[in-house]
Amino acid sequence: MEQTNKGQYFKWNLANEISKLFVKLLANEERRSEKEIMYRIEENQIQIPAEIQTYLITGLNPQQSLLVTRSIFFPWLRTRSKPLDLEIEQLLEYLEKRINLDQN
């Protein structure tokens, strides 16, 4: 997490790891494949706050790392919306609550 201060590429790497972990946990709990869970997240079939859904989708998409890298060298490719700027504490708090709710 310390490296996220170094730039968007490191933020994407963290988002990728968190997103993969969330998908694995959800797949295990719902007894579905990881691919199906990823599809359900992308298609808004799982109730997740919009900003967290966007963060997870960005983290799961390998193309995003390329776009992030390009935006460093080509500033006009930067978007106004930065899903990777989501507060990590907010995200982890939501994921923790989600996991705890599913276990009860």
Image (tube, rainbow, N blue to C red):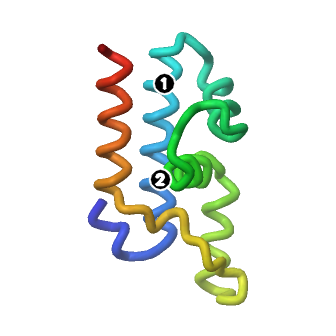
Q: Which mark is residue 102?
A: none
Q: Which mark is residue 26?
A: 1
Q: Would you say 32 lies left or right of 87 here? A: right
Determine the secondary structure under disc 1: helix
Q: The N terminus appears in which quarter of the rendering?
A: bottom left
Q: Would you say 24 lies left or right of 96 here? A: right
- Residue at 65 percent across and 50 percent down: it is 61
- Nearer the observer, 66 or 40: 40
Give the x, y percent position of residue 34. 60, 25
Q: Would you say 66 lies left or right of 56 here? A: right
Q: Which residue is mark 2?
A: 15
- Residue at 61 percent across and 27 percent down: it is 37
- Nearer the observer, 104 or 77: 104
Give the x, y percent position of residue 88. 34, 57
**Is label 1 in contact with label 2 (beta carbons under 8 Å)?**
no
Determine the secondary structure under disc 2: helix
